[in-house]
Amino acid sequence: MAGMRAFFARVVVLPYSPKVATVWDKMQAHSQLRGRTQPANDVWVAACCLARELPLATLNLKDFADFVEHEDLKLVH
């Protein structure tokens, strides 16, 4: 338990909000309409950033490329 507390002390945890849920829903629908359904967890991470107008820091560029192209997600890598 102490390890988990130490980990969370070093990271920013973005809370759920109705705006995040709405952005997530739209992103899921857009990806389905494009025929490129994305994993729900990747969409949630991107939606958290988009709802707050924050860039996403990731080394996993491939999984978020569709959001960069179609949802205007900004990446920091």
Image (tube, rainbow, N blue to C red):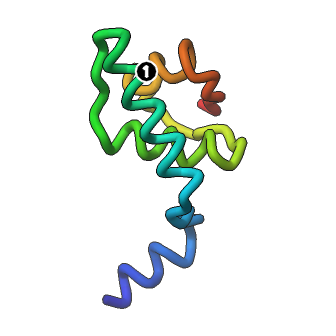
Residue 29 in which image quadrant = top left
Residue 72 vs 45, above or below: the answer is above
- In the picture, the quarter occupied by the C terminus is top right
> Residue at coordinates 30% horizontally, 40% vertically from top-left?
40
Query: Depth check: 74 or 57 in front?
Result: 74
Q: Name the residue at the right extreme.
A: 53
Quadrant housing residue 42: top left
Number of numbered discs overlaid on the protein picture: 1
Q: Residues within 10 Å of mark 1 (few under 14, many from 20)?
A: some
What residue lies at 29% left-to-right and 10% top-to-bottom? 35
Left or right: 52, with 20 as reference point: right
Spot occupied by residue 18 in the image (x, y as percentages of width and height): 54, 58
- Residue 62 vertical placement versus 50 (above, below): above
Left or right side of 74 for 13? left
Q: Nearer the viewer, residue 74 or 26?
A: 26
Q: Can you identify the residue that label 1 sits on?
A: 30
Quick one: SS at disc 1? helix
Q: Which amino acid, by three-letter code, is at mark 1?
A: His
User: In the figure, 24 relative to 30: above or below?
Assistant: below
Considering the image in quadrants, where does the N terminus appear?
bottom left
Q: Residue furthest bottom?
A: 2
Give how far across and how far down residue 62 sits, in percent. Answer: 40, 20
**In this picture, is 35 found above or below 77?**
above
Q: Position of residue 9 (x, y in %)?
A: 55, 78
Return the residue nearer the eye: 49 or 24: 24
Left-right relation of 18 to 45: right
Percent coordinates x, y for residue 36 in the rendering: 30, 14
